[in-house]
Image: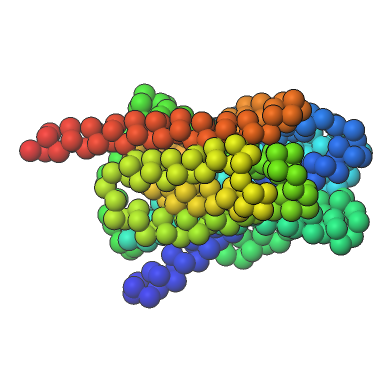
Amino acid sequence: MTETTHWRHDATTIAMVGLAHGTSHFFHLLLTPLFPLFIRDFGLSYSELGLLVSVFFIISGVGQALAGFVVDRFGARPVLMLAMCSFAAAGLASALATSYPGLMLAAALAGLGNAPFHPADFTILNKRVSANRLGHAFSVHGITGNLGWAAAPVFLTGITAWSGNWRLAEAAAGAWALVVLGLLWWHREAINDRADTSVSPRAAAQPAVAVEHPMAFLRLPSVWLCFSFFFWTTCALSAIQGFASPALHELYGLKLEWTSFIVTGFMLCGAVGMVLGGFLVGRTERLEKLIAACLLGSAAVLALVGTGLLPAAAALVVASMAGFGTGLAGPSRDMLIKRAAPPGATGRVYGTVYSGLDIGFALAAPLFGALMDHHRPGAVFYGSALALLAGVVSASLVGANVARRRAQANAAVA
């Protein structure tokens, strides 16, 4: 194939995987933007609503670790399409919910659909995208995830405000999953990770893979350090997604109509950071240093918001800007995991590592919900900042482990 053909094939694959990933992040927030309406209609507390988030991410986290093995065994494409069907069912279940158990069912179905995305996405990208575009592929993957998070509050609250009916908004979300499913089927060859890609420069560069026990990768410290990194950074993100809006309302007296845009602002700033991060990742050898600088900046910004000393309007803007640092670190994070992973275990490693994301959401949401129930809005931002600091420690240990393995490999060759 010509370079132009390679570029076209890579672009189609990146676009389809990005669309699917953005949709999965959209369904992370299938229920969260409508929490005030669920409190009104079902008489729920923030702790009970936080438990809905926990159900989603417990199912997603357990499923994600298992999905890595399924993806490696049966391929990423069929798993990805089944996930979209589960999202459509979640949208329908939430639209028809008449009580707390109905919302719980919707959260469970959405979590089941979310489970396979990271092992499936990264398996497709690593197998089908040329090596010289892989950093940008990771960047686009992260950007679309942030755009999915940013779009969900606008989509759901917008339709609710227009129609006066939150059930219509939930049904529309389910319909969107079916539209994406149709697009994935239309471009199914672009996401076929079992296709012969031996003619591409990416495939030609693949080394021979020694046969190992399927669980051998679990012995690598770098895998569990990456897991811990995702756990801590996701605890921070859980505070922003689920509770930053009511926290800003209580801490600064801003109207909820305005504070509801904190998630959208945070994610859009994160998307801008990821665009720049896609260029930096190929120029940085010690990725953990770049990650640390970015996350430390975001932690400082969030702690400042938590003091309650900023002007009200400025607090909303400053909290949103914290997303830039986390976004800038995103592509470097994904490349660091790739460097830490052994050859031939892509789905399993990404499934295990990214399950830290789900567990972080599952455990943090009830904790931050309890802080809001006890009227501690500043603690939401302080807790998020502390979690980012813990993530810096994990990333530094991952980078040191990767550097040590490379040094040992170079010494063996010499």
Residue 261 x/y as whole percent = 69, 53
Residue 343 x/y as whole percent = 33, 40
Q: Left or right of 95: which side holds 241?
A: left
* Residue 29 in sight in this render: yes
Residue 290 x/y as whole percent = 35, 46
Number of dots carrying numbers = 0
Instruction: Relative to 114, say whether 396 is above or below.
Output: above
Quadrant of the image containing the C terminus = top left
Q: Left or right of 214: which side holds 199?
A: left
* Residue 121 in sight in this render: no
The residue under the point 63% across, 30% down is 379
**Could you say which quadrant of the image residue 265 lies in?**
bottom right
Observer-nearest of 342 and 361: 361
The residue under the point 28% across, 44% down is 286
Instruction: Relative to 224, say whether 414 is above or below.
Output: below
Observer-nearest of 258 and 265: 258
> What colour-coding does the image apply?
rainbow
Residue 240 x/y as whole percent = 63, 41
Observer-nearest of 234 and 296: 296
Quadrant of the image containing the N terminus = bottom left
The residue under the point 31% across, 36% down is 399
Observer-nearest of 393 and 250: 250
Q: Left or right of 98: which side holds 106?
A: left
**Could you say which quadrant of the image residue 359 lies in?**
top right
The residue under the point 80% across, 41% down is 35
